[in-house]
Amino acid sequence: MPRFSVIVPAYKVQAYLSECLESVLTQSCADLELIAVDDCSPDACGVIIDEFAARDARVKPLHLDQNLGLGRARNAGLAEAGGDYLVFLDSDDTLAPGALRAIADRIEETGEPDVLVYDYARTYWDGRTVRNQLAGRLAERGPAPFRLADRPELLGVLMVAWNKACRREFVEEHGFAFPPGYYEDTPWTFPVLLTAESIATLDRVCVHYRQRRQGNILGTTSTRHFDLFEQYDRVFAYVEERPELHCWRGELYRRMVDHFAVVFTRRGRLPRGSHRAFLRRARAHCRRHRVPGTRLRPRHALVRHGLHRTFRVLRLASAVRRRVGRAAVKLARALRAGALRLHYRVQSRLPVRADRAVFAASWGRGDPGALEEAFHAHAPHIRTAWVAGSGQRDTALPDSRRLRSGTAAYWTALARSRYLVSDAGFGRALRKRPGQVFVQTRQGTPLKHMGLDLLERPAAARDTDFGALLREVDQWDYVLSGNRHSTLVWERVFPGGYTTLEYGSPRNDVFRRATQADVARLRESLGVPEGAVAILYAPTYRDHRRTQLPPLDLERVSDRLGPRFVILARPHPGQGGWLGAGPRIIDVGDRPNVESLCLASDALLTDYASIMFDYAALDRPIVVHCADWEAYEVSRGTYFDVRAFPPGAVARDEDELVDIFTGGHWCGPGSARLRAVFRERFCPYDDGHAAERVVRRVVPGGTEGPAKVVPPAGPGPVPPAAPAAVRAPSATVPQPSRPRPVTDSR
């Protein structure tokens, strides 16, 4: 008996069916049967189902002799199901990676509830993914399992069958089945939730709900939308037969009227000329099922009384009000923008303040944050301000002024401050004045193509305005570089009159200053078990992919690695929240300070992300996963083949990756030798004083002293926290050779 019976009815979805079935069969939880129901589809759905069944014994094909519709096709699959839990999935949707594992874990954790409700996200043709706005109602708070009376707000979550896992014996005991017609989910989900003795929630996106441009049943214009009335008759008939459920009639009545209003007002559902008839039917149903004392919103009252003309007039008035409101907001924004431009011009005519500096980073604190700390230490007469963007609530230093981008204070600071420090820029509106100093830190050592090299990579360049880019470059006074490779790349792809400071990476200074106690504190704050090997997984962004799916199934990898390893999963900021769940997977995507994650981990697992160059300075094992190297190199372009010059072991697929970790190659002497050569090339100046050198070079009147590199002698970076037996092979990695003298190059 499998744990899950996944039921997928298919009708005229040949373009999406393979992706749907693949999303089920590649789940890290393999204890399932996939019942694929061909609802007498006239296209290739039946053939596709048979092909999947031929290659995977878990697929049970079911071909119907005639088209029965979605509800009855589900019933046909339900009759063949033998799993502990039933999971329904529409054939144009997909299961998120690791969804069934997360569902199975939550079911076990909550004591086998009758129903588990999980979340979903809408996916659009342009690659956008938008999570359910009512996700907060699925919070895993309070006791679980519970009854619906304890959390009635669950009735507000989308009433569909595919966001719930139902215990099969519970369904069979009560004889739940799907009726024919449109909106077949309504008389299934309401009775199921009302009857369940135990319900639990899972606050995780488990289903990707495809928003098709055309072909969606509920998006088609048809009189079949009148089926909604019969479906609610079935719901109220079910409640009427069970006196213990009568207390829910008022809530069901409100839900029904709201559903009627949605169908009536949603453009493209009801055929032209049928709106009046729909409202008459709605009025009759409201009278039939009305519960005295039920409070309704104004539009519900219009539906209840069938006021067709009044409804249309109010809808028109509401549309006019919205348009006027949008126009007013647009005008207000334009006036504000004009006022801020004028403010900036006025401030730009006032003297530059030599004791002011502004810092900004695209994510976390990075090099600008390290330089701000160095300003405080070596140029204390300069007052600093930090521009905090989204996801940077805790990035400003306690004694630093916090600025919000786009405000009057922000533009005043940009106009009057002598020092401007950023790893990206301050926007095209910035006009650097005489007397101002712009320090461009960039965002690490480049592996992928950058700047003007993207002219040959239109997929990666997208809408880049290269003329505007070069105008920004002309404002730079200094550009930071961590090594000779970066210097040569920056000066070619960002041609300008700036001075290159090949002084090392300021953000990596913390690797030399941190102590073992700091590492232990960071690991404890992340929840890393004592004695576990923590792997920081940090993949890069794929420009050639419309949707940023995870390159690895972390749940499956975690299961194969075993209990000794813990994965700190950090997606690229542009990838969004795609991480899976598991007892040994810790989501650290909301931690902006990536340097602390490096310190807390024992090894790095990445692909083509520039974090590998920073992590090499920490002198801990690095494993590179390059399953799609050819596609990445063609779409983005790279400056060298990381497979030929890697910082450690290289895995080309999941099996090799697991073997590298379980076999000890990740921390073996071979990997250590590769890392030593890599460090010598890319981390020659990471001695813990890079930020200090930059400040001494850029700021006159600060702490006196030459801007030179101190060879990395004495104690190296803080060692990892894993047991000595694990890190022994890498403990004798040689320090990089004495670096070349630092020069300023144009």
Image (tube, grey):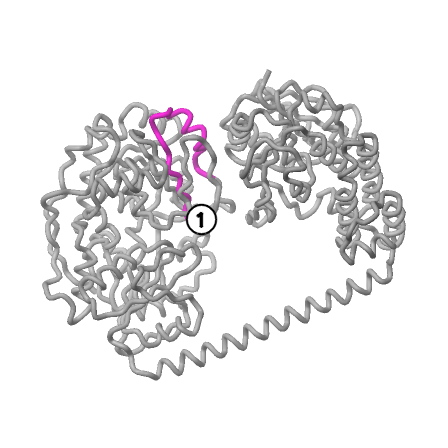
Expressed as whole percent of the image width and height from the top left, the position of residue 314 reads 79, 64
Quarter of the image holding residue 321?
Answer: bottom right
Q: Residue at x 58, y 24 (%)?
A: 112
Which image quadrant for residue 56?
Answer: top right
Q: Residue at x 36, y 70 (%)?
A: 471
Residue that badge 1 annotates: 543
Q: In the rendered view, tell whether residue 195 sits above or below residue 537.
A: above
State the image coordinates of residue 692 (x, y, percent, origin top left).
18, 59
Left/right of residue 332 with respect to residue 421 in the rendered view: right
- Circle 1 — which element? loop
Q: Where's the C terminus, which quadrant?
A: bottom left
Between 558 and 270, the one nearer to me in the picture: 558
Q: Nearer the viewer, residue 46 or 252?
A: 252
Task: Locate residue 231 relative to residue 411 in the image: left or right.
Answer: right
Residue 743, quarter of the rendered image:
bottom left
Q: Residues within 10 Å of mark 1 (few under 14, many from 20)?
A: some
Q: Position of residue 453 (x, y in %)?
A: 35, 56
Residue 141 position (above or below residue 391)? above
Q: Residue 572 in magenta?
A: yes
Residue 641 visible in this rendered orientation of the protein = no
**Furthest-top residue in this view:** 1
What span is colored magenta in the figure? Answer: 550-574
Residue 285: % across, % down: 87, 45
Numbered marks: total: 1
Residue 266 seen in render: yes
The question of residue 121 being in magenta is answered with no
Q: What residue is drawn where x is 75% and y is 38%?
A: 186
In the image shown, does 199 or 43 lie closer to the viewer?
199
Is residue 516 shown left or right of residue 522? left
Q: Quadrant of the N terminus?
A: top right
The three-letter amino acid code for the residue at tag 1 is Asp
